[in-house]
Image (tube, coloured by chain):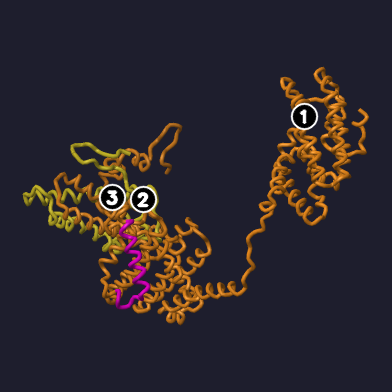
Chain colours: A yellow, B orange
Amino acid sequence: MALSTTVSQKKLIKRKAPRGFLKRVFKQRKPHLRLETTSDLLVHLNCLLFVHRLAEEARTNACENKCGVIKKEHVLAAAKVRSEFLFFITVALKHHLVRHLCLV
Amino acid sequence: MADSYSRDSEPTTRTLLRRVLDTADPRTPRRPRSARTDVQRALLQTPSSRRLRSQTKTTARRCSNRARSVDRLARVQASGHLEEQTPRTLLKNILLTAPESSILMPESVVKPVLAPQVVQASRRESSRGSLELQLPELEPPTTLAPGLLALGRRKQRLRLSVFQQGVDLGLPPSQEPHGNADASSLTSSLNLTFATPLQTQSVKRPGLARRPPTRRAVDVGTFLQDLRDTSLALAPPDTVLEDTQPFSQPLVGRSPSVHHSLPCCSHSGAKDVERAASRRTWSSGLGLQNNGAGKAAQLLAGNVEEVDALAMGFPNISSNISGEDGVEPLQNGVGEEAEERMEESLREVEKAAEAQGSARAEELEGHIEVTEAEGSWGAVEAKEPEGSSGDGDTSGRTASPELASSTPEFLRARRLQFLEPAPPPSTAVLPSEPPEPLSARLPPKPRIPGSRPRQDPYKTGLNHYAKLFSFYAKMPMEKKAVEMVEKCLDKYFQHLCDDLEVFAAHAGRKTVRPEDLELLMRRQGLVSEQVSLHVLVERHLPLEYRQQLVPCAFSGNTVFPAQ
């Protein structure tokens, strides 16, 4: 695994997926369910994409406020914008499940 | 030569050797000596014969004198031939020197042991009857002599004492020490050289020989008095122990079977701790502290069950340990168990403290922390800082008025004792560790399984994604913003798990599979007709993960991962 990415960042970032952490979290929340190994990586991918979108949104908010630093309220606003479709899934799932299945 | 074969006469070793020397092939230097040896033999044999007949020391002395004179003559003659250090010459020297002792001892040795010696002599003669005197033959006697010298010395001394007793009492000395003289008279004669000085001294100074031990008759009266004194000495501690057990009565009411036995041993342990901090007393001290903690718990009336369990656990351990001496691994294990239980009770106590009053809970905490400190101290040396810190905590937290209110006196005294020795080891080791390690060591045994692990690893996992957030943002972030991100991530994980559960249940499965994940991402809008999952995988995941996720064709008409 590539431990770090030296793109243009001074920080070193781990690219490794915290598979144990993800599995433990899932087990704690849903002990009656099981998580496959390959889906573990996809969960990590999902998290990455979520974080990516959230960061983009927060950066946009900070730039709009013309702040050089991302602040708490920027993040909050970004979360509110982005969390809506997260909630939307769980709330509307049971109603639209049949219809959305055809998308698969 | 005829005399040499007269076996009916006294067959002493000397005579035997004489015979051997004579019968052996004489070397050239032997010849001129043969005449002298015959003379000596004749001279010596007559005293020996006379010795047997007369059984008095005076005659023996006379014979010895005569033999000595003869020996001196022989030595003078023999010294001239010292350049020839043959075994013969050595043996001859031995024989010459022997008579001094043999004259005296054989009086007792020869007379009663005549029969066995005859047998042995015959055996020896047969063994030495070989014509040639060779070194191997000669070696056994010389080697036997030093080997059996030590044994013979003791036996000779025994015999000497027995002989003297016999002489005193007029009884013949016992035959058993002579019966086992396997080395027969040669070694005995050799050994006699060592024995005779004693005898001569004893004979010369009868006062020093058998000084009776200065014993006085046992005074029964004084003995009984001593017994009474010791019993009195023993009694007061028991009474003192019983007196200093103010809490034993309530404990007896609680659980007479287990706890009643404890206070006695625990008090003895208390006393021992005062004197010497031994390991065993730690266990008893633990039991003691446990009793105190149990009593304090009674006051709380909230954690009685837990502390009872704790107390029950400790007596079992201490009773098991008290029987053994210095079993360190066992005590280490006990100490660890004690610590764990202490931590459990401590956490439970903390909970109770929040619910109930703070003062009493703190007291119990203090008790348990002290005991925890004790347990840690007694168990492992490395845990001393924590113990000392725990003591520091108790000293800082539990003020004296709180202590005075409900703690028994001995408990306070014990805590003082522990506080006293605690600072020295803390100063000796390193008092730099703050209470943090103590609190850090509490987590290993959480009350609710998952309450504590949820904190640290969960935080580290969220930290990982928070760092990724800051990386993706490409802008400096505040600490509060990072915390905010972590909260969002927490909520995100919750929703994620719920969604996956629904999807898996919809598919009639209990295992979340990649299809469920793909559905989730499709619903999120990440995956669409233009952007497939594989594309996303390729973009954002490292190559190794891509190989596992995206099926790829390999050589040999294989596809990995298999679909």
Rate crowding at label 2 as few (under 14), some (14 to 19) or many (20 or more) other CA atoms within 10 Å. few
B139 lies left or right of B2: left
**Magenta residue check for B410:** yes
Disc 2 is attached to a residue of which chain? Answer: A
Query: Would you name the residue on which mark 3 appears?
Result: A46
Which quadrant is home to the N terminus of chain B?
top right
Displayed quadrant of residue B427: bottom left
Front-lying residue, B357 or A72:
B357
Query: Would you name the residue on which mark 2 appears?
Result: A20
Say what amino acid the circle numbered 2 marks: Gly
Give yes or no for contact between labels 1 and 2 (Cβ–Cβ under 8 Å).
Answer: no
Q: Regarding mark 2 in the picture, which secondary structure is present there?
A: helix
Q: Do the residues marked 3 and 2 share a common chain?
A: yes
Q: Which numbered dot is residue B91? A: 1
Say what amino acid the circle numbered 1 marks: Leu
Residue at coordinates 41% horizontally, 61% vertically from top-left? Answer: B277
Displayed quadrant of residue B298: bottom left
Front-lying residue, B69 or A91:
B69
